[in-house]
Amino acid sequence: MENFTAFNPTVLHFGRNILAALGATLKEYGNRVLFIYGSGSIKTSGLYEQIMSNLSQAGLEVFEYEGIRPNPLIEDVDAAAEKGRACKVNVILAVGGGSVLDSAKVIAATIPVHHSGWDFLDGKAKPESAVPVVAVPTLAATGSEMNPFAVITNTATRQKWAFGSPLTFPKHSFLDPSLTLSVPANYTAYGIADLIAHCFEAWFGIGDASLPDRFVVSIVKEAMDIGPELLANLHDYELREKIMFSATMALNGMTMYGRAGGDWGVHSIGHCLSFLYGIPHGASLTIVYPAWLRYFKARIPGRISQLGSSLFNAELTADESILKIEQFFNTIQCPVSLSQFGVTGDQRKTIYDNMVISKVSGGNMKLKESDFYPLIDLFL
Ligand code: NZQ
Ligand code: ZN
């Protein structure tokens, strides 16, 4: 194993009716709350009303920032930070999917400073303090509720980049699986794909870690068992509960212990596709993963066949493993090529150029610019 530090300060509250304690928890940090959310799903579901009444009963003063988009933009982060600064907020409440939670983390680090939040994403600045964040995820996918990471898009620089600091873990996260009952089938599937991809990024990361390898296999098996059942029964609380728990465990540090880092090459390519074509995050990963595995199968056949054999309980070659993984993505109706999103071969250069300016590589399986075209051809 590689040396590692285990650090995860997020307090996780999981289950039915846990939101009852939300107001009192926020109050521990002060009376002035910046409440951020997306484009309307929390209003349609009735969650907005429930939260506003909870906060008002707790005597909190609430300032709102509405309209965080999927693949969230730095403009929203900076505008929300400005509002938070002007309103002298003590705490941020983020309610929504990973896009809202990620935005909250960068807003939290940007409120105390006088520059754009993008300076954190591109490494020009490191946060020295951050406003506390309390998260209420409404979609099971990213694990943002129990990790420090945030992924933000900058349309000016044409980059969708990730960042994380020990200061940007949510202080508390309230996970009520019933809040995910309204997630439509496509985003439910993309969330399942995303959590599986997080496990794969760990599996193909740096260093041998046999126990975390077993965590990976267990989490992916759970998702592969439960996923199709959930897609056939979107209103089943117990199935939602299992997927929500799996998503949190897939990216809260546990699968990375004993490794010097994950790979994240597939994620960085996926971010290019989301930036260029607005492809939802999980779908971008099911498009790229089979191609990435095929591209590297000659170099790491043993590692790919070990993964496939463990997941599908059979002695599988690397090729058979890749096929099984691809079939699973098909089963949950996720795309496995860009053409399924209507993107065709004339986009090769656009994708290549974006991979260059996004500095796509991989922590373990390094990609050079000369790898880009042959890899793109495998997922087009
Ligand atoms: O904006 P609203 O109206 O809320 O609608 C959202 C959005 O349209 C909707 N939604 C959310 N909860 C719902 C719901 N619809 C009905 N019922 C509900 N309960 O779902 C749509 C997608 O939301 P989004 O937040 O974008 O999805 P997700 O949670 O998959 O987050 C994706 C973002 O997280 C980043 C991705 O790159 C992407 O930008 N990631 C963050 C990571 C992290 N923080 O660790 C790691 C991941 O690898 C990922 O990169
Ligand atoms: Zn992801």
Image (spheres, rainbow, N blue to C red):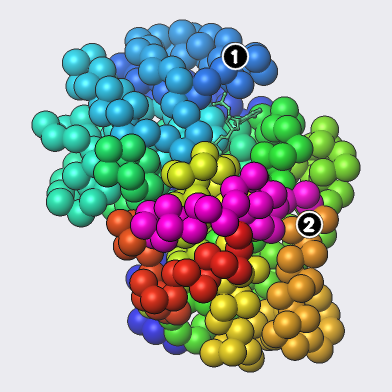
Image quarter of residue 299:
bottom right
Q: Is the magenta stretch mostly helix, strand or loop?
A: helix
Q: Position of residue 170 (x, y in %)?
A: 40, 42
Residue 224 among magenta residues: no
Residue closer to the observer: 375 or 191: 375
Q: Position of residue 142 (x, y in %)?
A: 54, 48
Residue 342 among magenta residues: yes
Q: Mark 1 points at which residue?
A: 43
Q: Residue at x 44, y 69 (%)?
A: 372
Q: Position of residue 360 (x, y in %)?
A: 38, 64
Amino acid residing under circle 1: Lys
Q: Which mark is residue 64?
A: none
Q: Mark 2 points at which residue?
A: 330
Secondary structure beneath disc 1? helix
Image quarter of residue 236:
top right
Locate the N terminus and report the quarter of the image it occupies: bottom left
Q: Which of marks 1 and 2 is nearer the N terminus?
A: 1
Image quarter of residue 51:
top right
Q: Residues within 10 Å of mark 2 (few under 14, many from 20)?
A: few
Q: In this view, does 91 lie above or below 142?
A: above
